Image (cartoon, rainbow, N blue to C red):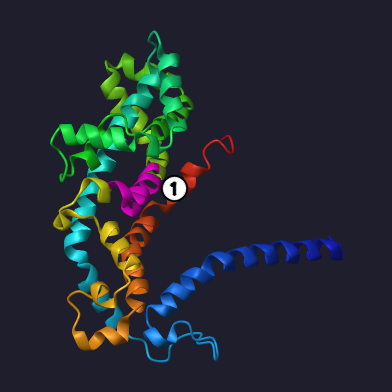
Amino acid sequence: MKRKASFYVKKVLFYGVILALALVCVIPLYWMLRSSFMKNTDIYSMRPFIFWPKEMLWSNYTDALKAADFGRYGINTMIIVVGCLVGTLLTSSMAAYAFSRVKWKGRSFCFAMILTTMMLPSSVTLIPQFMIWRNLNLIDTYWPLILPSFFGGGAFNIFLLRQFFLGIPRDLDDAARIDGAGHWKILFSVILPLSKAMLAVMVLYYGVGIWNGWFWGSTILSDRSMYPLQVVLREILMANDTSSMTAGVAAGDVEAVGATIRYATIIVATLPILFVYPFLQKYFTKGVMVGAVKE
C-alpha cells in the first residue's frame, strides 16, 4: 500500500523529537565522561571547543581512587545497601502479603494509615528519629541506616507489592493449601517466585536510592572511617581547596587534576549501578509494564 507523504513527515518529526530529548539526557553524561579525561585547564575551553581530548589522562581515575578511597568507603556502602535491600524485600513482601492475601479485621484501616505516612516529608521526622537513635546509644553505628528496613521496608514498597500481589490469581493459593501449605509456604514458594519482575524493580529503585543517599548517613555518622561512599563523594564535590580533594595524591599532580578528579570520581561511583542494571534489565522492563497491558 502506498503511504501518504504526511505519514513519513509525522514519522520524521516524531523520531526527531525523540532524538532531541535523548540528546538532552546524553549531553551531560558525555560532558562528564569527556571532562574526566582532560586537564583541569581544558575543561571549560570553548574556543576552540574540545569535542574529545587528544591525550586522555587515565591518571585522573587513579587519582580519584586514591582521593576517595573507593575500597574502604565502597565496602561501607555495600554493607548498608545489602542490609537495607534484604530487610526491605523481606518485610515489605510479608506486609504486602498480609494486606493482599489474608483477611483480618482492620486491614483496610491499617493500610490507609500506612499510606498516610507517604504524605509526610522526611524532614519532618528527621529530628525525632535522630533523638530516638541517640537515646538508644546507636549513633555512629550502621543500625540507624539498616534496621528501619526490617520494619516494613517503607510504605511505597508495601503499596507497590500489594498491588502486584492482588493481581495474582487466588486459585494458586487454594491449590497450595490443598497440598498442605501455610501462609509462609505460599508466600515464599508461590507468590514471590511470580513476583521476580516487581522485586527487580524494587532492587533497582530502592537500591539506587540507598547507594546515592548521603544526608542520613552524614547525620548519623561522625566517624569518617564508617562513612558511605556518597558522603565522601559529596565532600569532594563541595571542596573548595584542591588539596583536600586530592588527599593521597602526589603534590606534583595536584595542578594536573584539580576539578577533573570530581568528574572521574562521579564516573567511578556510577559504575556499580551500570554493571548491575544489565542483569536486571529484563525483569525491570517487565515490572514497570505490569498493569499497562493485560495478558
Verify whether residue 253 appears in magenta. Answer: no
Q: Give the range drawn in magenta.
A: 202-216
Residue 150, quarter of picture: top left
Residue 99 horizontal/vertical position (percent): 40, 20
In this view of the protein, can residue 99 be seen by the observer? yes
Residue 144 horizontal/vertical position (percent): 22, 39
User: What type of secondary structure mainly makes up the magenta span?
Assistant: helix
Residue 94 or 68: which is nearer the viewer? 68
Tell me the quadrant of the picture where the C terminus can be found: top right
Residue 265 horizontal/vertical position (percent): 32, 70
Residue 127, quarter of picture: top left
Give the answer, above or below, for where 27 lies relative to 136: below
Tell me the quadrant of the picture where the N terminus can be found: bottom right
Residue named by callout 1:
284
Label 1 SS: helix
Give the answer, above or below, for where 113 lies relative to 64: above
Identity of the residue drawn at 20% across and 55% down = 227
Q: What residue type is labelled 1?
A: Phe
Give the answer, above or below, for where 288 lies relative to 37: above
Identity of the residue drawn at 28% across and 42% down = 85
Identity of the residue drawn at 44% across and 82% down = 43
Verify whether residue 209 appears in magenta. Answer: yes
In this view of the protein, can residue 81 be seen by the observer? no
Residue 13 or 270: which is nearer the viewer? 270
Identity of the residue drawn at 35% across and 58% down = 273
Residue 268 horizontal/vertical position (percent): 31, 68
